[in-house]
Image (spheres, grey):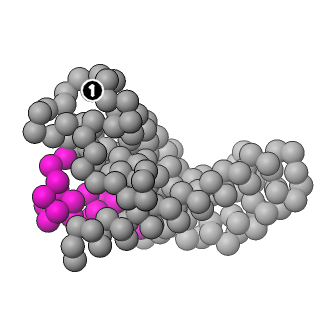
Amino acid sequence: MTLLAVSNFLAILVVVAGVGSLVVIGLRLTAVFSERAAGGLDRLRAAIGPYALWLAWLVAATAMAGSLYFSELGGLMPCALCWYQRIAMYPLAVILLIAAIRGDGGIRPYVTVLAAIGALIAGYHVLVQRIPGLPTGSCSVEASCSAIDLERFGFITIPVMALVGFLTILVLVGILASPTDE
């Protein structure tokens, strides 16, 4: 597959995951005020909850495979911030696979911390790309953190893909919580 085909496919997945995550977040926020939204959130948890760990693993594994494709086959050199995001995402793929196989929802706190750290780094990386004067501390000339090597649909860059991946994982592990957990 070509870099264009892979990046377009991943960008479409990012849009789908982003919209799905926004729907869940919107339901969660409106559930505080609306019985109907609370019921919808409960139905969503019942439908997706049993598969949430597998879906979260699928997101992490796809993000890991995508980052490896971009650097190893696509020839895009990862910058320092990309490496930090990989440091957060790659263990998530392993941890979530083990948790999904075991059906271990107790992994939620660990996944939440790792995905939140990754989301913060990816969010900052998105800002660095859009506001290049922001400090990165460890960028190199060969792989600048502010450089946009790939952009789809006018806004989806590799850090945006990572950010949506981390946020989707957070949403999915949030679905694991039963209504009595909160």
- Does 6 appear in magenta? no
In this image, 159 relative to 104: left or right?
left
Residue at the far right in the pictured view: 35
x and y, in percent, of residue 154 in the image: 42, 53
The residue type indicated by label 1 comes to: Thr
Residue reaching furthest bottom? 1
Give the main secondary structure of the magenta stretch.
helix
- The answer to whether any part of residue 116 appears in the image is yes
Residue 77 lies within the magenta run: yes
Residues rendered magenta in the picture: 58-78
Q: Position of residue 118 (x, y in %)?
A: 39, 42
Residue in the image at 27% along x and 26% along y? 136
| Dot 1: element | loop
Q: Is residue 2 above or below residue 150?
A: below
Look at mark 1 in the image and give the residue it sits on.
136
Q: Residues within 10 Å of mark 1 (few under 14, many from 20)?
A: some
Q: Quadrant of the C terminus?
A: top right
Residue depicted at 43% across the width and 51% down the height: 155
Foreground residue among 143 and 41? 143
Q: Residue at x 38, y 36 (%)?
A: 130
Q: Position of residue 110 (x, y in %)?
A: 45, 45
Q: Is residue 8 above or below residue 26?
A: below
Which residue is located at x 69 percent, y 64 percent?
45
Horizontal side of 5 relative to 15 (left or right) equals: left
